[in-house]
Amino acid sequence: MRLTRLRERIEKFGIRLEMIELPTNSTIATSGIKNVLLGKSPERDREIDGICQMIRNAQKAGIPSLKYNLTILAVVRSEPTPGRGGAMYSTFDYAKAKEDPPLTEAEPVSVDPTWERITYFLERVVPCS
């Protein structure tokens, strides 16, 4: 199993592999569970089945935790702010944020459908181990 080989290779350096990331990247454009975020069935059920298999594989490989991200947008920022020593700070200034940012393929999504999609995912994934 690839995860077991990865864990064993890392342990040869005297460190432990404690967590891996599920393919739930921080934007809908790059997410491995795009249909979960869009609420599209039956495609989202296939993606959730894949996530459940990844959880079982991590468990078999002895990897105790997994990380996921269920957001449609990446971290929203305005332009960087200059800081000490020439560093540039990641910044969000509401007054400088665009009024009409470009939409993702999800289009506008209100609060209730967003929470429904997250709940749908978690109710199916949490019992997978």
Image: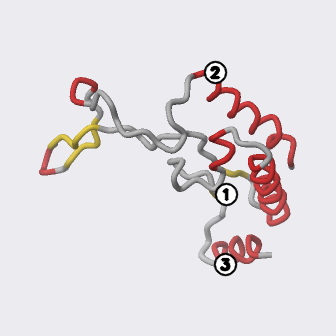
Secondary structure beneath disc 3?
helix
Residue at left offset 42%, top offset 41%: 75
Residue at left offset 53%, top offset 56%: 30
Above or below, 78 relative to 128:
above
Residue on which the image places disc 1 = 18
Report x, y in % for residue 44.
Answer: 74, 47
Counting other residues with Cα less than 10 Å from the Cα at mark 1, is it few (<14), some (14-19), or many (20 or more)? few
Closer mark to the observer between disc 2 and disc 3: 2
How many circles with numbers are drawn on the protein? 3
Q: CA distance from mark 2 to mark 3?
A: 44 Å
| Label placed on residue 112 | 2
Q: CA distance from mark 2 to mark 1?
A: 34 Å
Q: Are marks 2 and 3 in contact (CB under 8 Å)?
A: no
Secondary structure beneath disc 1?
loop
Q: Quadrant of the N terminus?
A: bottom right
Q: Nearer the viewer, residue 75 or 103?
A: 103
Residue at left offset 62%, top offset 49%: 34
* 36 left or right of 106 in image: right
Q: Are marks 1 and 3 in contact (CB under 8 Å)?
A: no
| Label placed on residue 9 | 3
